[in-house]
Amino acid sequence: MTKPPPLIFENSHDGGSLPALQMLVTDIFTWEILYQISQFAIRVAFMKYSKIIVNPKKANSDAAKATLMELGPSYVVSFVHSLYVTARGVMHLYSLWAASNMDKIYIGPEGDYREAHLEVARTNIL
């Protein structure tokens, strides 16, 4: 009798798959909220500072405005995401610095670096 394969994210999160999937859904909603806030902030900023943000003397100022309104929030979310994940990555390097190569790779159900691995798994979901 063979052992069934582990559930998705079984060792990477305390409690198995359900907490991992809950984190994923929470992160999706968080990024969507950030997107909506960014979209609103860009609209407000454009209403107040439109001549500074887009030069009206340029021939393609209407196209620039449309591009900013359409793509701007995505760029804001991407920028914030990159800063957040980079900061977490530096924290992971620090927390796993003294770990052996095997401890850095393997996410076991217990061990000295279990909490560090849970944080890495969280970052991977992001």
Image (tube, helix red, strand yellow):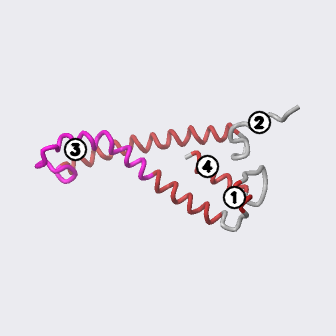
Q: Which residue is mark 4?
A: 122
Badge number at residue 64: 3
Taking the spot 73% from the left edge, 64% from the top edge, the residue there is 100
Query: Mark 3 packing: few (<14 Cα in 10 Å), some, or many (20+)?
Result: some
Query: Mark 4 packing: few (<14 Cα in 10 Å), some, or many (20+)?
Result: some
Residue extending farthest to the top is: 1
Task: Indicate whether residue 72 is drawn in magenta.
Answer: yes
Task: For the residues labelled 4 and 3, say whether their Cβ atoms are less than 8 Å apart.
Answer: no
Which of the pair 13/48 is nearer the observer? 13
Task: For the residues labelled 3 and 2, say whether their Cβ atoms are less than 8 Å apart.
Answer: no
Q: CA distance from mark 3 to mark 1?
A: 46 Å
What amino acid is labelled 2 in the image? Pro
- The spot of residue 125 in percent (x, y) is 58, 45
Residue 6 vs residue 26: left or right?
right
- Counting residues from the start of the chain, the first of labels 3 and 1 encountered is 3
What amino acid is labelled 3 in the image? Ala
Q: Which residue is mark 1?
A: 104
Task: For the residues labelled 4 and 1, say whether their Cβ atoms are less than 8 Å apart.
Answer: no
Badge number at residue 119: none
Q: Please give the range of residues in magenta.
A: 51-80
Q: Give the SS element for disc 3.
A: helix
Eye-nearest disc, 4 or 2 = 2
Q: Which residue is mark 2?
A: 5
- Quarter of the image that includes the N terminus: top right
Eye-nearest disc, 4 or 1 = 1
Query: Mark 1 packing: few (<14 Cα in 10 Å), some, or many (20+)?
Result: some
Residue 1 vs residue 86: left or right?
right
- The spot of residue 119 in percent (x, y) is 64, 54
Taking the spot 18% from the left edge, 40% from the top edge, the residue there is 62
